[in-house]
Every structure is written in C-alpha cells, then in structure tokens.
Image (cartoon, coloured by chain):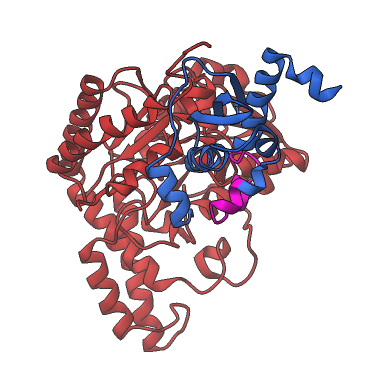
Amino acid sequence: MRKVYLDHAGTTLLHPEVYSLMCEFMKNTFGNPSSIHSFGREAKKWVDEARQQVADLIGSKAGEIIFTSGGTEADNLAIIGVAAARHKKGNHIITSSIEHPAVLNTCKHLAKIGFEVTFLPVDRYGLVDPEELYKAIRPETILISIMHANNEIGTIEPAEEIGRIAKEHGVLFHTDAVQTAGKIPVNVNTLGVDLLTLSSHKIYGPKGVGAIYKRKGVRLQPVVHGGGQEKTLRPGTENTMGIVGFGKAAEIAARELDSEFNRTRQLRDKLIQGIKERIPDVKYNGHPELRLPHNVNFSFSYVEGESMLLSLDMKGIAASSGSACSSSTLKPSHVLTAIGLPYELIHGSLRMTLGMMNDAVDIDYVLEVLPGVVSKLRSFSPLANKLTV
Amino acid sequence: MYNEIVMDHFQNPRNVGEIADASGVGEIGNVVCGDILRVYIKVKDEILDDVKYMTFGCGAAVASGSMMTTLAKGKTVEEAKKLTNKDVAKALGGLPPQKLHCSNLAADALHKAIEDWMNKTGKGDKLDG
C-alpha cells in the first residue's frame, strides 16, 4: 500500500544529510562544550558552527541564538523571560487567540500570577487586525507575542506591521516562527522582531531541540536556573548532537527554501483545487493568499474528523484534524473556534501539510481516496440524511 | 489506540442506515461534543425485528453503534432495555478510557428509541402503571 505522509506541520523525517552529520558527530565527538580541553573545544566548534547556521536562516547574528529543548521551551523563555525582566515597567501582554498552546498557555499562566493578558481576536481567515493591536496597547504593555503563521490553517500574520507598531510604542515583539522558518523567507530585521522561536523537527532536524532568537540588548530572565551555558539563559549542558543536527537542517532549509516553496505550493494548489472539484459541501479554511506554501485545511460537512483520519490511515494517508475527538484534551480546535467555524465544521476539519516526502503522485492518490472516505462516512451521517419518521 | 474488534466494526459498520417505517427513533449526543447517534427500531411482537443506526462521530461512536445494533437485533424489548453502554464497550473488547463517556452512547440511544416506541403505542403507560 502507498504511504502518504501529510503531517509535515506536526513533525518531519530526519533529512538524510542531517542524519549523516549527526552520526559522524556522535561517533567522534563527546566533549562538553564548556570544557577547556581539546575534547570540549572540539564539541564547542560544532555547536558554534550550528549556531551560525541557525542564525543564517533568519538573518541574525550567531550570538543572538539561544538553543533550547524545542519550540515550547523557547516560547516559555521568551514570554516568561520578558515578563520577569520587565515586570517593574508594566504587567500587560498582548497575544492572539490562535497561538500555539506553548504561547497561549504560557500567557494564561502569567494571567494567573498577576499579569494582564489581551487575547486579540482574528477575522474569518485567521488574521490579526493591526488596528485592534493598536487599540490594545497600554502604557503598561511590555510584550506582544503573535505567531508568524498559524500551524493549523497556515495563515501568515502581518508580522512586519506588528513589528512596526511594537517599535513605535517601545513594546517588545516576540513571534513564534516554528511554522515559517525554513518554509518562507524569515528575516528578523525585516520582521522587526525582538524575540523569535524556532524548532528543529519541523525542518527535517532532530526532535528535542529548538532556539530562541534574542535581539542584542533585549533583557530576559532565565526560566531554568543553573550554570553559564547559553549566556545563563538556558543553563544545562548542551544537547550537542541535537544542536548539530538542527544547524545542518537550518542550512539545508535555507539552501532549498526557494525550490521547496515553489514545489510544495504547486502541490498544495493541486490538492486544494482537486478537493474543491471532487467533493461537495466543503469549506476551505484559512486565507487564500496569505498562506503557508505547504498547508491545506478543509472542513467536510456532516462527517467527523477522527473517523476521517482513521479511514485515511487505513489507506496509508497520514493527516490531522481539529476535531475534539481527535485531540488528547477532547476539546475542539481553538483556532477553528476563533475563526468562527460552527462546531460541525470544526469536528469535520482535516489538515494536510506537505513537505519533502510528497510528490504529485501522492496528491493524485489522496484525490482518489479522499472522496470515497468522505462519501462513505456521509452515507451514514444523521446530519447528511434528514429522513424524518 | 483502538483494538481489532473496534477497527473491524469501524471499517465495516453493521446495520447502518435508516428504517423508513420505524416503530421508534432515538437520538443522543450533540454537535458541540462531536458525537451524534440516531437509532431506528422496528418492533414486531415485542421483538426488535430490525435495528439500524446513523452516526456523526469518531471511530468509537461508529463502532459502538455497530456493536449495539448487532447485540440488540432479535432481542425482546425487555431484554434490549437491559443492554447498557458498558455491555457494548465490553463486547467491543474495550474502548480507550477517554472515549468511554463521550462516544459510547449507543445503548442510551437505543433506550430512547424504545421509549419513543412505547409512547407511540401507549405501552409506556401500561408498563409504568
């Protein structure tokens, strides 16, 4: 059976070049980068190289990259770190209602311990309105944290405009770029960000490693306390093999950004077009243009997402859904709720995210299988069949 | 996540569909939580001659509807009234814990269909009295 992986926004496979380099590193280098001796210096050389590779992906300086255990920790460090460093200046944070849980729940945590948080609404495409942001800023606002692009519906937020507004008001701007870095051009200076979150395993690097970009001069308090690693902001002996893999993945992502952007966008549009042509009663979620090149999100009326995922999985197709039944919390997607979808369409949502593992034959296969899956589930859906007795 | 029995009933759901001249219809669940199950029964001589169901729901909802109808078909009304959600889950070889209360509602829907039949035929009063 054909296997089609359409969950690249969830995680990606390890790029073969990343794998090779990590093997080489692990075989030969075990030193602690903090050690003075040759073993330590050798490890440090690898980590420095990776830091430069990650910095190059986002147009920053190597010294502005702090490695963490992943995107979630980077988001926590940025938000809690700013809150702790600037609480005397103010206690107000602005974020959006469609953030990744790593940002959303960190902000909710701060709200519990005395900070005030504004969760900006989004329009039906998932866009934050810069006017609303303008109005939400107060003298005591210390941080704006708005994602660069949404992980579920792929909508790309007006980050440059948000950056300008933040700068104008002397407020720090953090963006979670886990879904954008390596997929669309990301430059910290163009975006005007002070803090930016990165993750390795979304760009064909290993899991368990990420980074926060911190503009030079921005003050942060560490969340974890310990030794002097990562400028004391992220103490603990470095995950050297993860960092080495992340660096290589960043280098490859930068190298292949243009070609992968165009390739996945073509596949994406073929899939979107094909679904619209072949399946009736569908709702296309997210923005038609301001959209990640690899994101497809549809709701299928009358059917439930987990049933779709199971049926597709039996045909070798891996996707995800915003349905309550398919989430570990049993709550419907907060993103699809925020864009105003009715419950039926939230439960009937299907996200397919493309990447390196996909080609046009995959898309043909999905377009062959998906209509049958949807119509089978619709055939016994009480919402599709309104027979009254 | 789901065992083989559940996956079999999900993949090949038994007794799906509607009964045009049903003796009773019962529906449970709502679109907010994401599971809706509607049950149709045809009663002949106090026996469930036919039981069919329709569902909007997850794998567990599809499978529990399939298993419930399989268990209920051919039973007397009195026997069917004793069928519980737990019996359905047990016959399925178990369901993941988080699915037990939200998606395992097929027996409740059956009881609603029986109630509907009883109300329509006036048997409700007789049985209650």
Q: In terms of depth relative to the viewer, which is nearer, A236 or A128?
A: A128
Q: On screen, B92 above or below A277?
A: below
Residue B56 in picture, x, y percent from top left: 49, 29
Q: How many marks?
A: 0
Q: Is residue A363 above or below residue A25?
A: above
Residue projecting furthest to the front: B45
Q: Which chain is red?
A: A
User: For this rendering, which residue is in front, A291 or A142?
Assistant: A291
Looking at the image, residue A297 sits to the left or right of residue A387; the answer is: left
- Residue A115: percent from the left, percent from the top? 73, 37
Q: Inspect this view and state whether residue A201 appears.
A: yes
The residue at the point 64 percent across, 48 percent down is B87
Q: Residue furthest right?
A: B129
Q: Residue at x 49, y 55 (%)?
A: B1
- Asked if the stretch drawn in magenta spans residue A172, the answer is no
Residue B90 part of the magenta-drawn span: yes
Indicate the colour of chain B: blue
Magenta span: predominant SS is: loop
In this view of the protein, can residue B95 be seen by the observer?
no
Residue stretch in magenta:
B88-105
Residue A262 as seen in the image, left or right of residue A153: left
Q: Quadrant of the C terminus of chain B?
A: top right
Q: Is residue A42 above or below residue A211?
A: below
Residue A19 position in % (x across, y down): 26, 69
Q: Nearer the viewer, residue B113 or A59?
A: B113
Quarter of the rendering containing residue A136:
top right
